[in-house]
Image: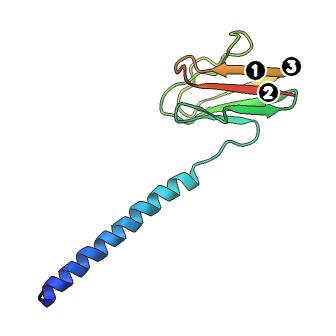
Amino acid sequence: MTKSEIAISKFIFSSALILLVLVSGAGCKKSKDEPKPGPNEVFMQNTAFNPSSITVALNTTITWTNKDGTAHTVTSNDGTSFSSGNIGNGGTFTHKFTATGSFPYHCTIHSGMTGTVIVN
């Protein structure tokens, strides 16, 4: 192998290694920087409620925030306790829970999206 062929091989190897490190780091940064729901908060993301179950004290207000690029709803399973209507990306819905019990809910647009608020 000539000196120029060795130099080209080293350059290609170094470039590939740098690209691998950059791509690997970008993936880690995204998941690390992704915000998590705070207390009394539920995110709608990846076509799921996060967390899917939340336990709160009586007279607590829950805020749901849509982190997806598609609309979602927050609708009580009984159909009367609460209903957000369509919530677009970045939109929010709040509801104050003034009774104790278990309150299951779902997204009317995406039947697999379900959650529960438990009020003590």
Q: Which residue is mark 3?
A: 99
- Rendered image: mark on residue 103: 1
Q: CA distance from mark 1 to mark 2?
A: 6 Å
Question: 28 or 69: which is nearer to us?
Answer: 28
Q: Which disc is residue 24 wearing? A: none
The amino acid marked with disc number 3 is Ala
User: Seen in the image, is 109 located left or right of residue 83?
Assistant: left
The quarter holding residue 74 reads top right
Disc 3 or 2, which lies upstream in sequence? Answer: 3
x and y, in percent, of residue 76 in the image: 69, 16
Give the Cα distance between marks 3 and 1: 10 Å
Label at residue 118 = 2
Residue shown at the point (46%, 56%) measured from the top left: 27
Which residue is pictured at 79% across the width and 33% down the height? 55
For the residues labelled 3 and 2, the Cα–Cα distance comes to 10 Å
Where disc 1 sits, the SS reads strand
Q: Quadrant of the C terminus?
A: top right
Left or right placement of residue 46 versus residue 99 in this view: left
